[in-house]
Image (tube, rainbow, N blue to C red):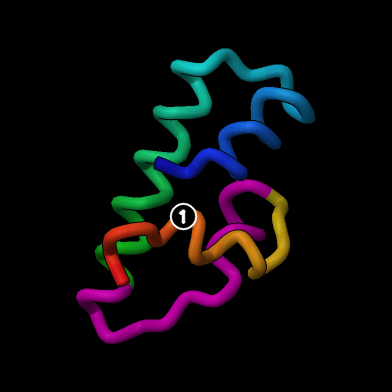
Amino acid sequence: MSYAIKKVLMERDQMTSQEADEQIAEAKADLEQRLNDGEMPMNICEEWFGLEPDYLMDLAGDLM
């Protein structure tokens, strides 16, 4: 689970827990697809959440 990202989304963007979980799940699916395509999308957290690449490992979790 992407706890750091979820916390940011809920505090900064006033998302509910469910909304944050849904957006994180969509971003994870996008990340997984890009990795399967041979891409290393270092800026995916910026694209999805407006967050720096430091959050990539939080998003990737068990994918990497």
Place of residue 42 in the rendered image (x, y in percent of width and height, measured from the top left): 55, 76
Quarter containing the C terminus: bottom left
Place of residue 19 in the rendered image (x, y in percent of width and height, measured from the top left): 49, 20
Place of residue 6 in the rendered image (x, y in percent of width and height, measured from the top left): 57, 34
Place of residue 8 in the rendered image (x, y in percent of width and height, measured from the top left): 70, 36
Query: In the figure, is residue 5 to the left or right of 51?
Result: left
Q: Which residues are magenta?
A: 35-49
- Viewer-proximal residue, 30 or 8? 8
Quarter containing the N terminus: top left
Check the image and report above or below for 54 versus 15: below
- Rate crowding at label 1 as few (under 14), some (14 to 19) or many (20 or more) other CA atoms within 10 Å: many
Question: Which corner quadrant of the image does residue 53 belong to?
Answer: bottom right
Identify which residue is drawn at 53% across, 65% down.
56
- Viewer-proximal residue, 9 or 26? 9
Identify which residue is drawn at 63% across, 19% down.
15
For residue 4: magenta?
no
Q: Residue under label 1, please give it.
A: 59
Identify which residue is drawn at 27% across, 86% down.
38
Three-letter residue code for mark 1: Leu
Query: In the figure, is residue 5 to the left or right of 26?
Result: right
- Viewer-proximal residue, 36 or 21? 21
Check the image and report above or below for 1 versus 64: above
Of all residues shown, which one is farthest toward the bottom?
38
